[in-house]
Image (cartoon, rainbow, N blue to C red):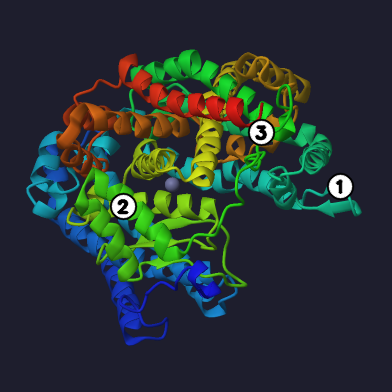
Amino acid sequence: MSNSAFVGPAWDLESEYPSLDSPRFRSDLEELTRSRDALQNLTSGLKVPDGGAPESEWVEGVSVVQKACAIRQRTDILMRNLASYVNMLLSVDSGDAAASKMDSVLEVMGASLTQAWNPADLWITLAPGSALESYMQDSRAAEERFVIERRRLLRDQKLSLAEENLVSSLQVTGLNAWGTLYDRIAGGLKCSIQTQEGLKVMGAASAQELTASAQEPVRRAALEGITQAWVAYRDPCAAILNAIAGWRLEVYRRRSHTRPVGFMDCPLYSARIQPETLEAMMGVAMREGRALGHRAYAAMARAIGKKRLDPWDRMAPAPALPGGRAPEPRTYSDAIGLISGCADRVAPEMGEFFRMMASKRWIEGRVMPRKLPGAFCTSFARTREPRVFMTYQGTPSNVRTPAHELGHAFHTWAMRDLPIAQCYYPMTLAETASIFMETLLNDAARSSGDETLAWGGLWEESHNAAAFLVNIPMRYTFEKEFYEKRASGELSADEFEELNGRHHREHYGDSLSGPDPIFWQSKLHFYISGISFYNFPYTFGYLFALGVYAQREKLGPKFFTAYRDLLRDTGRMVPEDVARKHLGVDLTKPDFWRDSVRIAEKSVAALERAVNERFA
Ligand SMILES: [Zn+2]
């Protein structure tokens, strides 16, 4: 067998655009520009009445906003189609100068489209009920009902138009600038790391990679180097966190003119869930889940020959199975066959779809010098054809990656006939199909007797249990207490460190030898200016996907239809409604979440057994 059998194929993008210079790409770009101009013309004349204006003033705008909606739906598809293509080109060749240039052209285009649409958006958000209903008479507008109703939930938080404009314009050099400052600090960090070849100085990203080394001294030196580098920035980090949260709390205070707006309102709105759902989910994660995460860490510690894990071991890879055969590389077509075979067991239709993805060359898997690392699933908005990006080299984790990404592709495919406005799902539901496929593959590997694949799967799943049930809940409670405290004043770097240590100890207990003292500094997610509480949706998504998987046994032959229909509704219903309609479960109650933890428990128990048998 030639070596090329272990390397992934090139994806086919030509069916969409032959190249950036092709007539098809050019004509789409020209149409997009014309449509953007038409939208600008239309909405610049739109009058958005004041709060107390009579109904008749609103009705005047109906036909203009309907026309604007039709144009915007067209520009949405063109913009996404072109941008996805350019992004795909840059992913396989990050040095593609023409694609980079087009990327900036499209970025400017995107901003001007948002601005052109803003007046219509404001009209839709603020219009009184009857004017909105006449707007919805238009079939294209009606397609967006769910999204519109969501936006209108924020009506009673709106400030005056002048104030809204002031906030969003000051935000660029205010709130966002703090995020940029953090990115600059993190990007410029110099970590000195003691390696076998002597002291090496490297950036935080490279140092972070070393924390996943198979050699403990390397992991340890890497975390020590990162810690030392961050310690110099304790005060700036504290100032940034205080400023970001302080800005938000002040805006929330001003938005509280009709009802109190709390710091959780905005993240819950983005996640599209109710506070009761978050409480039920986090409650189960922190009660039943935490203990499971500790068991996972204990078993992992034994496998790498330690009593318990140290903070630098959290990313340790699976050690080789004693007495096991060295893993043989798996060919690309074998991997696709394996994944499709797993999917066949859920429904032949799903397996067929994966085989079609491969035969139509909708998967990119080559090894190339300027290719980006990582993997993702994207799609063309016009044809709704998905594309999977990854680098395939035949390792066991190379088999799990396409399973995850093909899961995403199936999600896109299940929605392909829906209006595009109904296809945007929140982060809480985004990983449903991908984690489902990974779980399916890991389950199949355990019963197939493929020792290496099964062992890698157990390690990964146990690692996930600890990450999603211990680490993420810790970030959530840390951030929550920080916001509560910040409401009455700034916190010092010492206070952040105390808070960080206390939440580490509460969640990790004895499962780790000690806290990661600079976690509050090094975790980028606390410093994103665009979104707060970038943590609980991860645990939600993980447990939700496992909970869906758990329904396979319960629903038997009815499962696949329920699963596909559930995926189809992820962009047009809130998670609570999706779960009630398709699975008959109530997300505000702990039971559903307990079923999810039970699925994770099976993997951790299997890891424990494997460790007892093989690493005694
Ligand atoms: Zn994913």
Query: At 52% across and 20% down in the image, what residue appears?
Result: 292
Residues at marks 3 and 1, CA–CA distance in whole angstroms: 20 Å
- The percent position of residue 419, horizontal first and vertical second, equals 19, 54
Question: Is 377 located above or below residue 424 in the figure?
Answer: below
Query: At 53% across and 51% down in the image, what residue appears?
Result: 397
The mark lying in front, picked from 2 and 1, is: 2
Per the image, label 1 sits on a secondary structure element best described as strand
Q: Amino acid at mark 1?
A: Ser
Q: Which mark is residue 449?
A: none
Q: Which residue is mark 3?
A: 314
Query: At 51% across and 63% down in the image, what residue appears?
Result: 392
Mark 3 nearby-residue class (10 Å; few <14, some 14–19, many ≥20): some
Q: Which residue is mark 1?
A: 192
Which callout, 3 or 1, points at the residue further toward the start of the chain? Answer: 1
Q: Amino acid at mark 3?
A: Arg
- The percent position of residue 123, horizontal first and vertical second, equals 24, 45
Report whether the residue tagged 2 is closer than 8 Å to ligand 1: no
Which callout, 2 or 3, points at the residue further toward the start of the chain? Answer: 3
Q: Is residue 49 visible?
A: no
Q: Amino acid at mark 2?
A: Gly
Q: Which residue is mark 2?
A: 341
The mark lying in front, picked from 2 and 3, is: 2
Report whether the residue tagged 1 is closer than 8 Å to ligand 1: no
Residues at marks 2 and 1, CA–CA distance in whole angstroms: 47 Å
- The percent position of residue 480, horizontal first and vertical second, equals 55, 20
